[in-house]
Image (spheres, rainbow, N blue to C red):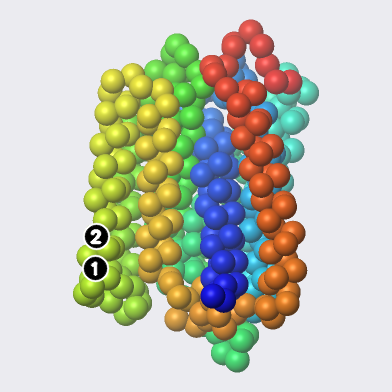
Amino acid sequence: MAIDLPTVWAGIIAFAVLAYVVLDGFDLGVGILFPFFPERQNRDLMTNSIAPVWDGNETWLVLGGGGLMAVFPVVYATVLPALYMPIIMMLLGLVFRGVAFEFRWRTARGSIYWDVGFWLGSTIAAFTQGLAVGALVQGITIVDNAYAGGWWDWLTPFTIITGLAVTIGYALLGATWLNLKTTGELQARSRRLAMATGVITLGLIGVVSLWSPFINENYFNRWFGWPTAFFSAFVPVMLAGCAFALWHGLTTDKHLQPFLAALGLFVLSFVGLGISFYPYIVPGALTIAEAAAPESSLIFLLVGASVLIPVILAYTGYAYWVFRGKIDPDEGYH
């Protein structure tokens, strides 16, 4: 039985993107929440909670982007020009955030300015990621395997909504992470923020979910046509289950449950995107099979990925295991 290598690689890249979203999402969320914690001590605890893992979390972004360029070069060559502005803004946000993260520890008098930079970089990175996802969902104009749209096609009311959804969703992940890793007043305030951002996130997921099927006829048929509607219906049911688990965990002083429930919201939203897109990798323009590199390249790259991905998973898991538990206010990573 022949292996469908393009589909296998689409799954690998989708996994890398999802891993980036759920892992880097919470540490971006910690930065987004900085204005709600003006005290220096609280901000030190917040950054200490992510200091051991935040660099490693971004490994998945490199793997996803590099894999896309190598395995689906046509997609890389057409989608990147369509999203130049949000992608450049995202990368600048991530760079500025990384600089601010380190510099805020090196100066007491100028710390407040680097804190603003950390918040701004985190927020810009999150919002532009949402813009990019929204632009991909609404469709990219491709003619003869080249981008044929305008410079500002990515900026629409729909993409602004998706940008807000991702930003507030990351704030939810950050709040539930702080609920998991901290104690006392910081944890209590994080729990309240998690409840508020959870409600807003669910509302925005609902808006995007109801809007998306009317953007593209394929989405509508996939979600409401028979028999695919039967299987698609499980996604909103499981979303409701995650929403209940989030609420229950926050109201009964659970620490891990809210974080896992928030991650579940993102995973299920990502599954919903997959249901809408498949078998396209660029909706309505390029299928997975059409965009794939030659089979020899896919096999060669798969050998490397079969070694690299388990190594990344191993050291990522080990890092989280070593730094498990609550943050000690009297100790720090720096």
Q: Nearer the viewer, residue 55 or 308?
A: 308
CB under 8 Å between discs 1 and 2: yes
What amino acid is found at the position of numbered circle 1 in the picture?
Ala
Category of crowding for the residue at label 1, using alpha-carbon neighbours closer than 10 angstroms: few (below 14), some (14–19), many (at least 20): some
> Residue visible at 55% across and 55% down?
15
Side (left or right) of 287 relative to 237: right
Looking at the rendered image, the quarter that the N terminus falls into is bottom right
For disc 2, the marked residue is 233
Residue at point 57% right, 16% down? 327
In terms of image quadrants, where is residue 324?
top right
Numbered disc 2: secondary structure: loop
Q: CA distance from mark 1 to mark 2?
A: 6 Å
Whether residue 126 is visible, yes or no, is no
Q: Which mark is residue 229?
A: 1
In depth, the one of 199 and 115 nearer the eye is: 199
Quarter of the image with the C terminus is top right
Residue at coordinates 34% horizontally, 78% vertically from top-left? 218
**Where 232 falls versus 198 (above or below)?**
below
Q: Is residue 68 above or below residue 261?
A: below
- Indicate the secondary structure of the residue bearing disc 1: helix
- Rendering coords of residue 263 (x, y %): 43, 41
At which x and y percent is residue 192? Answer: 35, 25
Write the residue at 26% across / 42% down.
Answer: 241
Left or right of residue 307, residue 20 in this image: left
Q: Is residue 205 visible?
A: yes
As shown in the figure, which amino acid type bears the numbered disc 2?
Answer: Ala
